[in-house]
Image (tube, helix red, strand yellow):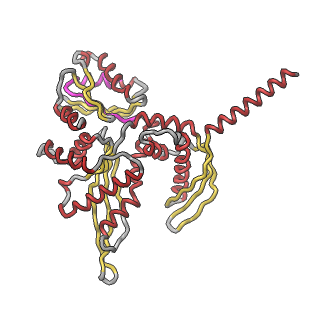
Amino acid sequence: MKQKILLSSLGLIFVIFTFQSLQAQTKSVEAKGTGISRDDALQDALRNAIGQAVGVSISSTTEVENFMIIKDAIESNTRGYITNYEISSETKLQNGYEVSVKASVSLSPIKADAQLLARQIGGVRFLVMYDKRHVEKEKINEFEYAVDRINAYLSEKNYRYIEKSRFERLQEEAFLIMEDTDTSTMSFVQKLGLMSGAQFIILVDGINVSERSENFDTRTAARVVIETRVYDNCTAEGLGTVMLESNWNSSGSATMTGIDEAIDAGFEKVMGTFNSYIGNWVNNGTPYELRFYQVGTFRDFRDLRNKIKESPDFGGQFQITSVNNYTRLNATFKNVPDDIAFQILDFADAIPGFAEKELDVIMIYGRQISFAPREIVVPEIEAAKEFTDQ
């Protein structure tokens, strides 16, 4: 009888302990969201609920580098974090909906994903820029103002970005080292990104101002549309184009007011592009661009790709691009970022064509890793090192 009571007591203690452990791993939060449709408002509310839980999972007493990027990236993917929720209220607004929810958010996967992203992201910095070679002189002030306003937005969100003064110095240097025949904006963007050490780039590609007469032609109103292009500079991948639009303004400085309004109203869409992209790294691995100089035949790279495919740490389409003793391979990597270079070198050592050249790492820039035979000097890499070391 005493044994049964003891077993019952132990069982009760186990149940209580398990319940308390589950409680500790789950956070109940109340959150509100808005959107054009009811579903948009609901998803916004769930994202806000996850945002509250992120602050609990990543202790507020511990400094986490790139906390805002990690938080926003996790918020962008509501799947896997919300265990259950109920809608406590919903309101039809003049231009959309407002939804309030009570949600239970699982903290364990948030904490694990946050730690993974912290290792993968590293020292992320943004470069906000425009290509002044393709901007009319009378519109330069508008582009300068837009860049300043976007940098101010990044500062308010605690994102790291390249200071304008440093960008201006690097811009002049980039003009000097670029070939006269290489006038493409993409090449210019990539060179500046590498020289500045920026992993992500926001290019202000156009500012269009429309005007119309109002109040019986006694005043003129202006509407501003800003075209922004976003890039992952480490993999030379374009992430998309986002248009920022203002309302019609008839103030004395209608264009600048329109730029302010367009950025204030729509810039979250630009950051949403980055956040969704980074959030996908949790499930799909981190994208890398592997660059190889003066090494390997097509057969060698076929063998290397086959070895990469066999590794569970790698993923993606393993796209290979090759020209003039230069080969680029894009892939994703699911393990600790420092290990990718070691694994590639191990694979290369097992391939005769690579092994005889004694392949080594000559530069790591964010998620772009460059390889070449020992003792080989690659001019463009040496030039990049000179700028990034300054």
Q: Number of marks in the image?
A: 0
Return the x and y of residue 66 as percentages of the image width and height: 42, 41
Q: Describe residue 150's horizontal placement relative to residue 119 as left or right.
A: left
**In this picture, which residue range is highlighted in magenta?**
286-307
Q: Is residue 87 above or below residue 303?
A: below
Quadrant of the rendered image containing residue 160: top left
| Quadrant, the N terminus | top right
Q: Residue at x 36, y 25 (%)?
A: 308
- Magenta highlight on residue 293: yes
Q: Describe residue 368's horizontal placement relative to residue 116 as left or right.
A: left
Return the x and y of residue 181 as percentages of the image width and height: 12, 45
Quadrant of the rendered image containing residue 64: top left
Quadrant of the rendered image containing residue 137: bottom left
| Quadrant, the C terminus | top left
Q: Residue at x 13, y 44 (%)?
A: 176
Q: Residue at x 52, y 53 (%)?
A: 44
Given residues 318 and 101, the one toward you in this image is 101
Q: Residue at x 31, y 70 (%)?
A: 254
Identity of the residue furthest to the bottom in this view: 216
Q: Is residue 216 above or below residue 273?
A: below
Given residues 279 and 327, the one toward you in this image is 279
Return the x and y of residue 90 as percentages of the image width and height: 60, 60
Identity of the residue furthest to the front in this view: 61
Return the x and y of residue 48 as percentages of the image width and height: 53, 51
Q: Is residue 319 visible?
A: no
- Magenta highlight on residue 19: no
Q: Is residue 187 visible?
A: yes
Q: Is residue 146 above or below residue 383?
A: below
Identity of the residue furthest to the right in this view: 1
